[in-house]
Amino acid sequence: MKQTLECIECGAVHPLNERAYVCPKCGGLLEIRLGEVLDFDPKAWSQRPLGVWRYRELLPIGEKVEVVSLGEGGTGLNECRRLAKDLGLKHLHVKNEGENPTGSFKDRGMTVGVSQAVELHADSVMCASTGNTSASLAAYAARAGLKCFVMIPAGKIAAGKLAQAVVHGAKIIEIDGDFDDAMRLVVDVAREDRSPYLLNSINPFRVEGQKTIAYEINDQLRRLPDIIVIPVGNAGNITALWKGLLELRALGLADTLPRLIGVQAERASPIARAFRLGSDHVEPVAKPETVATAIRIGSPVNWKRALAAARESGGLIETVADHQILEAQKMLASREGIFVEPASASTIAGVGKLVDEGVIKADEAVVCIATGNGLKDQEAVSFLAKPPVRVKASRESVMGALGLGICSVSGRRVYSRNFLMRSGMLGS
């Protein structure tokens, strides 16, 4: 597969091995474009394990390069029948990206991005992060034997995510500011000679790995759904998803493409606001706040491509409130056994809202992308949990708590209603 690195603004073409994150000519974002199809046989994919590197011919890493991998991709696509019924749908699947090695979709982009860092002979890598990016980059850097630097906003990162970066040996740099400040700083530092290789989603190689979500959904369903719903923070994932879908069509592997629906938290929704206003410009949110820390971003790098993905697909960018996110998180876990972080649950909240408004029809097939594991951010749900029932360490006390037999209350024997009905002592 012959691929080129092109500017989405001025169209300038650059070599794939050029260490650039934005166009040197105009400052526009760079994108890797499929060129002439050479040796490409999609039938060969079925002989390989489901995962990012199943699709190596469509990824911009040289054939002789030993890729840096932890077995990413190949995540479950779960049919959720009870949840679908609750939401008023007939067909709902959840793509559980929390099954990736470090617990989020970021691993898809990092396996390609860190492999490119190795190909460029970089000795260190860096990123700004709200949590998942730092965890993923630290793990893949460790796997590749590279030094890793992570810049985070002080006091804004979920403990579970930060712990991953720490244990993998990254050097953590906290700043007095938010993610947007951290992002601005790493981009600025990346311009310096001998600086660490930058691996935020501004890096086009990150997008290449993340686009494989589209390929996998097509393989797992043997078709594409009517709608794919995805959380939007820095907007690299919706950008990657749309890129993957367009490539499937260009390669003759898909005829019709799904509508893309991006979901942002109400108080961190600059892209949704621009979409609603029909604007071609995004006004940053000065102080974004939401319980969904992974999408708590006020100045997203990929806003232009996110707007294009929503508009070109016939989709939209929606918002949901924090209380809707937490309710959806609890619903997905209790109804389907899938525990996701709050940002992931925003997709379920968004679907519920749009079904109620008639934007999503009951008979449309919907896939929600759950981007991260719930264990990443346990603090967000701690107040939702019911306190445990404490009883004496006796059989009678436990049976009583279960509603299965007798328990002692103030010295009297009290029988549960269930027990009395089963024993015939109480009629139904």
Image: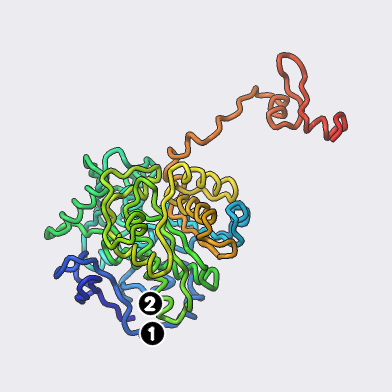
Q: What residue type is labelled 2?
A: Glu
Residue 39: mark: 1
Residue 391, quarter of the rendered image: top right
User: Which residue is label 2 attached to?
Assistant: 57
Judge whether residue 399 can be spotted in this image: yes
Give 80 or 196, whichever is nearer the viewer. 80
| Badge 2 or badge 1: first in the primary sequence | 1
Q: Residue drawn 41% across and 69% down?
A: 313
CA distance separating discs 2 and 1:
8 Å
Q: Residue drawn 36% across and 84% down?
A: 37
Q: Give residue 4's position: percent from left, percent from top.
A: 26, 77
Q: Which amino acid does label 1 sit on?
A: Asp
Q: Give residue 333's position: percent from left, percent from top.
A: 55, 47
Q: Give residue 291's position: percent from left, percent from top.
A: 40, 42
User: Tags 2 and 1 in contact by the CB under 8 Å rule?
Assistant: yes
The vertical placement of 87 against 115, above or below, is: above
